[in-house]
Image: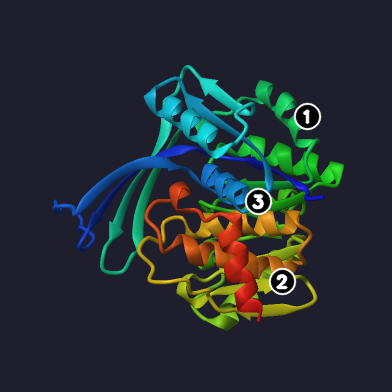
């Protein structure tokens, strides 16, 4: 029986332009194409975990506007339960302004959180009750922080596994970091959290050690094209990326990895095996355009994952 995954986090509408190059300050350039669709780290990770086969409960906050209605329709199409979605009549649905460089597939992003940055304390008791029905908690830092802190404390008290994707990187007191079983920053976020230069492997290892010293159980640092570093407190490993074709859009790679990692752990995979699985989900996702719409499905992930184990 698979363990259930509770994802709490952001929904924003992705507004994406693709260009030949990034504009410099004060410059206006012509884009190659434009797309709008569902995004936000919490939402992307919930979709990634669901498509990878996990039983997912997702809690977010949407505005009472056209973008919020589009999000609800998307979740229904994905088979994601919308019982945990709160409609905010005061704030607009969040938005992410994304530029993707066609030549490199790299991106620049500005996120305006909107409704999902305004969770209220009085809503949290019901959310905490929903959490108690799950086995794994997956969080990011794209909402206001107080609910994240409450969820971490409640999960720790209830023996629920916690995975924190600390993005965008910001300060979180050690008393809350001590509630984190697995943390999954990228190298930039790891540097922000620890003050350690992560531009080389030794720096990555040192940053991970700093995070472990804060009481975090296990550390995963994603390194873009250089793969993944993992440390479970006893053993450390570097993993190469999983190549599944030519990358065309890296925007949702980190979210694909985190969602895939949670799904793998929900299936009972061990820590290092789950990292390979998450890397496979990310490896497929970057070959497709879009964030949530580009997340792969369980059958495809399993086929590539099993093939790479041979």
Image quarter in which the C terminus is found: bottom right
Q: Residue at x 33, y 49 (%)?
A: 98
Q: Residue at x 59, y 45 (%)?
A: 46
Secondary structure category for the residue under label 3: loop
- Eyeballing the image, is 224 above or below 78? below
- Eyeballing the image, is 219 above or below 98? below
| Residue density around tag 2, few if under 14, some if 14–19, many if 20 or more, within 10 Å | some
Residue at the far right: name it. Answer: 158
| Closer to viewer: mark 3 or mark 1 | 3
- Eyeballing the image, is 248 above or below 290? below
| Residue density around tag 3, few if under 14, some if 14–19, many if 20 or more, within 10 Å | some
Q: Which residue is mark 2?
A: 272
Query: How far separated are the C-alphas under marks 3 and 1?
Result: 24 Å
Q: Which mark is residue 53?
A: 3
Position of residue 58 measured from the top left corner of the image (x, y, whole percent) = 62, 37
* Mark nearer the N terminus (2 vs 3): 3
Query: How far separated are the C-alphas under marks 2 and 1?
Result: 31 Å
Which quarter of the figure has residue 276?
bottom right
């Amino acid at each position: 029986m698979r363990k259930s995954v509770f994802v709490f986090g952001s929904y924003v509408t992705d507004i994406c332009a693709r260009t030949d190059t990034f504009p410099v300050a004060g410059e206006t350039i012509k884009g190659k194409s434009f797309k709008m669709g569902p995004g936000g780290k919490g939402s992307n990770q919930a979709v990634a975990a669901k498509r990878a086969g996990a039983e997912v409960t997702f809690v977010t906050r949407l505005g009472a506007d056209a973008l919020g209605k589009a999000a609800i329709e998307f979740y229904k199409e994905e088979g994601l339960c919308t019982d945990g979605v709160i409609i905010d009549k005061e704030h607009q649905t969040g938005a992410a302004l994304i530029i993707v460089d066609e030549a490199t597939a790299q991106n620049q992003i500005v996120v305006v959180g909107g409704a999902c940055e305004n969770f209220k304390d009085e809503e949290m008791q019901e959310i905490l009750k929903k959490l108690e029905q799950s086995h794994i908690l997956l969080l990011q830092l794209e909402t206001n922080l107080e609910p994240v802190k409450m969820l971490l404390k409640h999960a720790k008290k209830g023996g629920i596994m916690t995975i924190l994707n600390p993005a965008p990187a910001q300060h979180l007191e050690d008393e809350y970091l001590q509630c984190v079983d697995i943390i999954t920053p990228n190298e930039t976020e790891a540097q922000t959290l620890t003050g350690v230069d992560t531009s080389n492997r030794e720096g990555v290892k040192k940053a991970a050690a700093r995070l472990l010293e804060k009481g975090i159980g296990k550390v995963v640092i994603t390194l873009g094209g250089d793969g993944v570093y993992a440390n479970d407190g006893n053993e450390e490993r570097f993993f190469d990326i999983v190549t599944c074709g030519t990358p065309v859009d890296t925007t949702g790679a980190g979210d694909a990895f985190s969602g895939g990692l949670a799904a793998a752990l929900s299936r009972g995979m061990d820590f290092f095996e789950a990292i390979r699985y998450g890397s496979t989900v990310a490896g497929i996702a970057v070959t497709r355009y879009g964030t949530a719409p580009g997340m792969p499905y369980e059958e495809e992930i399993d086929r590539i994952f099993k093939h790479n184990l041979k």
